Amino acid sequence: MSGQGSGGNVIAAICSFFIPGLGQLVQGRILAAILFFIGMAISWVLVYVGIGIFLVPIVYIWCIVDAAKFKAKG
């Protein structure tokens, strides 16, 4: 199994850099992938309200770090 810092996590983090949620999908975490993708979409919609300008980078970086630090159980 691959653990934190493995090559698989680096690939997942790179995938999340390009498309938020894709890294989680590569790791087989479908629910997390959907939630990060939807969270990023909502953040971009909220840019028009003004708060999204702060949410977009937070969700974006969170998604990448989550993919990079994932450690499989077991």
Image (cartoon, rainbow, N blue to C red):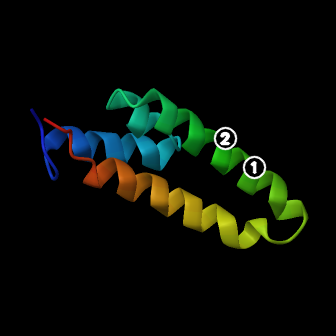
48 with respect to 39 (left or right):
right
Q: Which mark is residue 38?
A: 2
| SS state under label 2 | helix
Which quarter of the picture shows residue 74?
top left
Which quarter of the picture shows residue 1?
top left
Q: Is residue 46 above or below residue 50?
A: above
Query: Could you say where residue 51 lies in the image, as x and y percent from the top left?
Result: 80, 71
Contact flag, marks 2 and 1 (Cβ < 8 Å):
yes
Amino acid tagged 2: Ile
**Residue in the foreground of this view, choosing between 48 and 3:** 3
Disc 2/disc 1 C-alpha distance (Å): 6 Å
**Which class describes the residues within 10 Å of circle 1: few (<14), some (14-19), or many (20+)?**
some
Identify the residue under disc 1. Answer: 42
9 with respect to 22 (left or right):
left
| SS state under label 1 | helix
Residue at the (82%, 52%) spot, across then down: 45
Residue at the (58%, 40%) spot, across then down: 35
Task: Identify the residue at the far right of this view.
Answer: 49
Query: Could you say where residue 26 lies in the image, as x and y percent from the top left?
Result: 35, 29
